[in-house]
């Protein structure tokens, strides 16, 4: 048997130990920051696409190695604030936002949805107000019987 065949046989005979259980336990314990790190990594990749850069370009701009950038964009890195600040400066993006207790982040879609709801509600109240004024300005006819649907509290405020 040749030396190469003997080495292959020895490698095949050894049963490599698997640490998949430890990896799963690590992911469960660190789920919160891993999720955030993944979102940061995706944002970095989007910014690279927007700028037309590759990871080597980012490495040059940051003054680090290509391997360090590779770790950053894999989403498995526990980012330091100094690293995030450098990335924000170089990529001209915002990766972190610190909110007060009573503040919340609203996406552009959420703002549009809320605006559409408010516009729709305004138009509904305007129509009800116009109906009220039309009824109020009609000359009373004792032979006319009207059916009026129950008004909500909001409608009372508009009827004024």
Image (tube, helix red, strand yellow):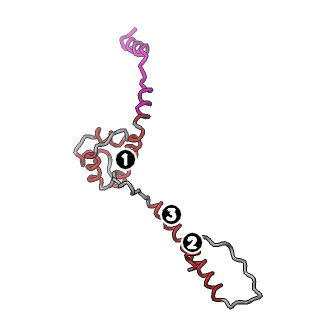
Q: Position of residue 45 (x, y in %)?
A: 37, 48
Could you tell me which quadrant the N terminus lies in? Answer: top left
Q: Position of residue 135 (x, y in %)?
A: 65, 84
Decide which of tag 1 and tag 2 comes sooner along the chain.
1
Which mark is in front, 1 or 3? 3
Q: Left of 127 or right of it: where is 15? A: left
Asked if the stretch drawn in magenta spans residue 6, the answer is yes
Mark 1 crowd level (few <14, some 14–19, many ≥20, 10 Å Cα): many
Quarter of the image where one finds residue 136: bottom right
Q: Position of residue 89 (x, y in %)?
A: 26, 53
Which mark is in front, 1 or 2? 2
Numbered range of the magenta stretch: 1-26
How far apart marks 1 and 3 lie (CA) works out to 26 Å
Question: Which of 116 and 128 lies nearest the eye of the viewer?
Answer: 128
Q: Which mark is residue 154?
A: 2
The residue that label 3 is drawn on is 113
Q: Left of 24 or right of it: where is 73? A: left
């Amino acid at each position: 048997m040749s030396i190469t065949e003997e080495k292959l046989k020895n490698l095949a005979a050894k049963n490599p130990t698997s640490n998949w259980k430890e990896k799963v336990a690590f992911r469960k314990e660190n789920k919160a920051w891993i999720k955030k790190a993944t979102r940061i990594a995706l944002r970095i990749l989007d910014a690279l696409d927007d700028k037309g850069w590759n990871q080597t370009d980012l490495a040059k701009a940051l003054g680090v190695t290509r391997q360090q950038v590779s770790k950053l964009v894999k989403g498995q890195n526990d980012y330091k604030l100094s690293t995030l600040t450098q990335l924000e400066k170089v990529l001209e993006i915002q990766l972190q936002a610190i909110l007060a207790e009573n503040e919340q982040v609203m996406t552009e879609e959420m703002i549009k949805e809320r605006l559409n709801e408010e516009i729709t509600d305004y138009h509904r109240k305007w129509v009800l107000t116009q109906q009220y004024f039309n009824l109020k300005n009609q000359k009373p006819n004792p032979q006319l019987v009207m059916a009026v649907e129950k008004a909500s509290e909001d409608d009372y405020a508009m009827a004024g």
